[in-house]
Amino acid sequence: MPDAEVAWRMATEAHSQALRRWCSAVSSTTGESGYGDPLTQPFWDAALEERLVIQRCGSCGTHQFYPRPFCLACSSEDVGWVQASGGGTIYSLTTVQRQILPTLPPPYVVALVELDKGPRILGWLVGDAPPEIGSAVRVAWTSRDGSSLARLQSG
Ligand SMILES: [Zn+2]
């Protein structure tokens, strides 16, 4: 197998593992599993202080979210954490009409927001302003069961 193909497969597997860990940590907000994954722990620690942090590559400066063990732009493993402003614009959105979480009755809006530093974050959108693609939003925080959950505030 050519080296490039081996490297691609290894990067793909590392990405898949990071995504599984991230989804596991996110599902812990519904009480399904625990926190503490070394890759995502800085995010959860900052969330307890109601701060949004994202990764920044030390080699090329690219920002990324959700957390991964390497930079998506240049594959460097020199990725650290920086504080995001919490501001962004709605890239896409949908209204959820079916009950998925027992604690979150529909309808509610889920938005994909492009943060000021570039990465996109998916979240529950709240606020009085009618949501529209391109509208400005900010990350806001809700405390629940000893953790802080990020939500997206419009208007
Ligand atoms: Zn990079």
Image (cartoon, rainbow, N blue to C red):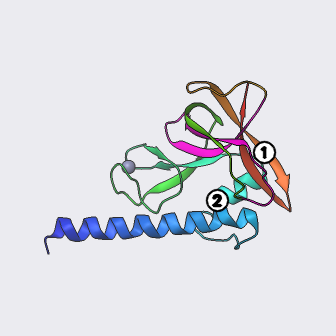
Q: Which residue is mark 1?
A: 141
Q: Quadrant of the N terminus?
A: bottom left
**Vertically, is 17 above or below 47?**
below
Q: Is residue 112 magenta?
A: yes
Expressed as whole percent of the image width and height from the top left, the position of residue 125 reads 70, 39
Relative vertical location of residue 116 with respect to residue 6 in this rendering, above or below: above
Taking the image as drawn, is residue 97 in sight? yes
Q: Position of residue 36 (x, y in %)?
A: 67, 71
Q: Position of residue 103 (x, y in %)?
A: 81, 57
Q: Amino acid at mark 2?
A: Pro
Q: Residue at position x 49%, y 37% from top?
A: 118
Q: Can residue 39 be seen here?
A: no
Residue 16 vertical position relative to residue 139 in the rendered view, above or below:
below
Classify mark 2 as within 8 Å of ligand 1 or not, answering yes or no.
no
Q: Give the residues drawn in magenta, as a range.
A: 101-127
Q: Secondary structure at mark 1?
A: strand
Taking depth in this image into account, of 56 and 50 the one nearest to the observer is 50
The outermost residue toward the front is 98
Crowd band around label 2 with a 10 angstrom C-alpha radius: few (<14), some (14–19), many (20+): some
Which residue: 57% across, 63% down? 22
**Front residue (pair 100, 86):** 100
- Please state the total of marks drawn on the protein image: 2
Left or right of residue 111, residue 58 in this image: left
Residue that label 2 marks: 42
Mark with earlier residue (1, 2): 2
Residue nearest the observer in this picture, 123 or 140: 123
What amino acid is at disc 1?
Trp
Quadrant of the image occupied by residue 15:
bottom left
